[in-house]
Image (cartoon, rainbow, N blue to C red):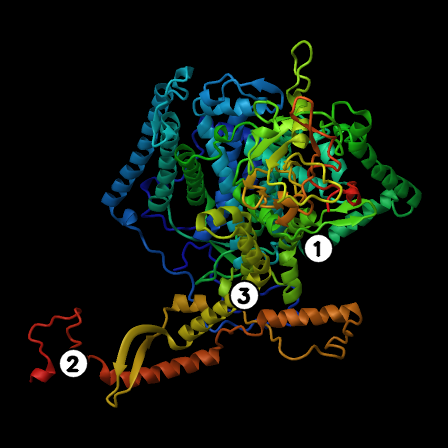
Amino acid sequence: MTEGHDGHLPGLPGDDSHNGSHDGHGELVPGPIADPGLPEHVWRPTDVDPKAEKRAERQIATLFGLSTVCVVLFVVSYIVFDVNGGGGGATVRTVGGLGASNVALGVTLAGALLFIGIGLIQWARKLMGDHEIVEMRHPARSSDEDREETLRVLALGADESGIARRPLVRNSLLGAVGVLIAPAVIMLKDLGPTNRDVTDSQPYIGAGLEHTVWEKGVRVVRDVVGTPIRTGDLEIGDLINAEPETIFEVDENGDPLLEGVPLQIAKSKAAVVVVRMDPDENNPAPGRENWAVDGILCYSKICTHVGCPISLYEKKTHHLLCPCHQSTFDLADAAKVVFGPAARPLPQLPLMVDADGYLVAQSDFKEPVGPSYWERDSQQSTSK
Amino acid sequence: MSIDTSKVASTNTTAATAKKPNPVGAAAEWADDRLGLATLAKKNLRKVFPDHWSFMLGEIALWSFVVLLLSGVFLTLWFTPSMGETTYQGSYAQLRGVGMSEAFASTLKLSFDVRGGLLMRQVHHWSAMLFVAAMMVHLLRVFFTGAHRKPRELNWVVGALLLLLGTLEGFTGYSLPDDLLSGTGIRAADGFVKSQPVIGTYMSFLLFGGEFPGDQIIPRLYIIHVLLIPGLLLALISAHMVLLVYHKHTQWPGPGRTEQNVVGFPMLPVYAAKAGGFFFCVFGVSALMGGLLSINPIWKYGPYDPSKVTAGSQPDWYMGWPDGALRIMPNIEGHFWHHTWSWNVFLPIIVLPMLLFTIVLVLPFIEAWITGDKRDHHLLQRPRNAPGRTATMVALMTLYAVFWIAGGNDIIAIRLHLSINQITYFNRAAVFVLPVVAYLITKRWCISLQRKDRDDLLHGYETGIIMRSPEGGYSERHLPLSTGRAFRLASRDRDPDVFGELPAGPDANGVEPPSGIGSRLAGVRHRLRKMMYADNIQPPTIDELEQGHHHAEHEHELQVPMEGHAADGHQFDGHHLVEGEKLRADD
């Protein structure tokens, strides 16, 4: 039975000579049943039957051959199928709603790989020697002699360097290396300006967490087309996604006032929703009584939780729901949080009507929009 | 080595000889003269790997990482990691003329203008999901079978770090296309960063190169995704493999398999062929998924716009659980000295994941402290034979599952027509209650299974044959287990005795028991040990086994007279020829 197992007889039960103490662990009594030893090896049909062996050989070679067929089909698919309908916007060929090119390339590549994989495993299982062999383990730890020798050499090194005898040298070296962290950290400073930097220098309109591009007299415009809004455009129950007109403004040459990063930053803070409700249903916060125009209210669209734009409005209840983490705000009650993880109401933008009858802002938001941050002075919130 | 290969393949009988100079031999000699590889190779080429299906889970993770490297390199050839603005002019008609970032435009190009580009994108994304999933299941396998015990605790730590890095790699990766969904994810991440006390705002501004969104985040995530984290992953995977080879793989107990040996197939040729073949299989399955299953169709989401969002925004599955914690957290915010503490964000998304990760990282050390077991372990344990440990992991899994379900509360509410408020309130309670329930059920379940093993050992297995004695009593026929199976069931340690109080005086070696905080810790440890061991069923002793056998023999003697006398009518059981048989009642 054990012929060919490295000459090692399987261990007898209970001869486990573990190192280390047991600390009250169950004593290593011999197991109740003696180890019967490795079971006898059983020859496979492919080992004893030349026909079965030949058949397995043919099967495996067929699998490898099929892989090559798949590779040929892959190359053919690459040439035959357009991914883009020739680039002219023509209809792309599809299979079950998926692009034909993608499906053909994927399936043929999968075939090419899987046939090789299955063939290899089949080879290993059917034709390669299947004798289990035994290898002895060695403790992970080094031998005691090795440990002692290492300690001796370490001590020798320490001694020859004099690291213990010369604390001045040692400590000044440790200090010097430690201080090297400073350059590594300080060099990251220019990764970006700080909030204070941009707030003070105002490199673009509305820079800093406490500002947006809203200011007195800026028109409230529809977010995609940029058209201004009259009070009469909104029925009770309507909600419009809006932006400040600044975002769409162009200078005398026809170039946009805001583009690139400042535009994105402006959008990320200035996006608002405009809703109209029955003025009797609205319950404004103290000091905000004149922020609405004919029941038209304007709130920041940026969630006070982690900053997702809020989109789902339920007319009947005046509830606005954030699709990211389901914070729900009651727009008829100063956008108070009625459900979810957000902790603060949505900031409100004071509205008025300009000479042409369009909705404009009375001022910027009175508090920072978006998620909370450490320096945010919450006590100054105008919310209730 | 004297393996009987007489019947294997006829080509194996003649060993390769180096008598004739051949080019391969010459090249090998040239290399060995300089590198001395033969010394290393002779030890490792026939290294033994034990065989079990569950040892394949880590391999899936390893191979999907290789698939990620290959498909990822392909993607970098076209992807432009830039937030520079461009107007799309490619072949996807619906977005033509739309302003977007270079990153998004180049992802569209990969999807619609590069043949096989979409396939590689989808292969990359699917294998990323597979990578993280396989690591998690592998972690569970290791823990449930006790493979994390000495001497493998450090490899557990390496593995846990791999899981953390793999998750971060996934997040940085799916954020790169700069589409509306991933942009929303980065928007939320900015909120997470800002929630940190004192440093939050600075971190956010440094990360984004100024105010969110800026134009820095995509190129920065890109270099983290393609260089920094993959480099760390490669280094840690190498360490994981080196330790695996050094410790040698664990194995299941069984006939001939002991703590001192490892039994299995040699690396060359069987294991190499199987593992190599398995790589092709993992790659093939990823390709099949990439070809047939659509994933992350960014053209449907559109480019990122900070003022827009899609309903039902969901991160990739492995980011779901912290998102769930964020969703069910009560909305507590603190105000202090003109400063803001965002407990509602900081606790669930920064503190909780770090805490849970730390717990996972130190699990082997906590267990070793409780058990006080300092022995090396190379034989695996069946989960039932460590009920306390198994139940602990199931409790953690339950916690994870509740958070994960909470992360999909909007989808659940819509699909099942439930109230999102009620789902949230339920989950708030469930994170505390369900893990405890899961712990108790699992522990009892394990103990019942232990009892069954013990019964099988003592009384044999149930044959399903009911015997009736002449007196009319019924008994079931039990037959002894096969030696191999009996040995396998009995090969487990007896648990230490944990009953009784901690000894008060000095122990046998004259060491005084610890006082102060040490004594309190010892008390905690004693209670934990009780929790871990007290109710476990121990394997039978030799005496008990012998008694069991006597009992079985006795039973058998009693049953012998009934042998072959089936109850009337039972002779027509389909197992015997019934020609000429008739019911005794007919006589």
B102 on left or right of B461 = right
Question: In this orientation, does residue A381 appear?
Answer: yes
Residue at horizontal 55 percent and vertical 30 percent from the top: B179
Q: Nearer the viewer, mark 2 or mark 1?
A: 2
Which mark, residue B575? none
* Nearer-N-terminus badge (3/2): 3
Mark 3 is surrounded, within 10 Å at the Cα level, by few (under 14), some (14 to 19) or many (20 or more) other residues, namely some
Where on the picture, by quarter, is residue B485? bottom left
Mark 2 is surrounded, within 10 Å at the Cα level, by few (under 14), some (14 to 19) or many (20 or more) other residues, namely few
Whether callout 3 and callout 2 share a subunit is answered yes
Q: Which residue is mark 1?
A: A145
Q: Extreme bottom residue here?
A: B471
**Residue type (three-letter) at the residue carrying disc 1:** Glu
Where on the picture, by quarter, is residue B576? bottom left
Q: Which residue is mark 3?
A: B437
Q: Which residue is mark 2?
A: B568
Q: Secondary structure at mark 2?
A: loop
Question: In this orientation, does residue A184 appear?
Answer: no
Residue at horizontal 35 percent and vertical 38 percent from the top: A119
Q: Chain of mark 2?
A: B
| Nearest to the observer: residue B297 or residue A355 | A355
Q: Nearer the viewer, mark 1 or mark 3?
A: 3
The image position of residue B259, as x and y in percent, is 53, 61
Q: Secondary structure at mark 3?
A: helix
Q: State which quarter of the image contains the N terminus of chain A.
A: bottom left
A14 on left or right of B474 = right
Circles 1 and 3, Cβ within 8 Å, touching? The answer is: no
Q: Chain of mark 1?
A: A
**Residue type (three-letter) at the residue carrying disc 3:** Val
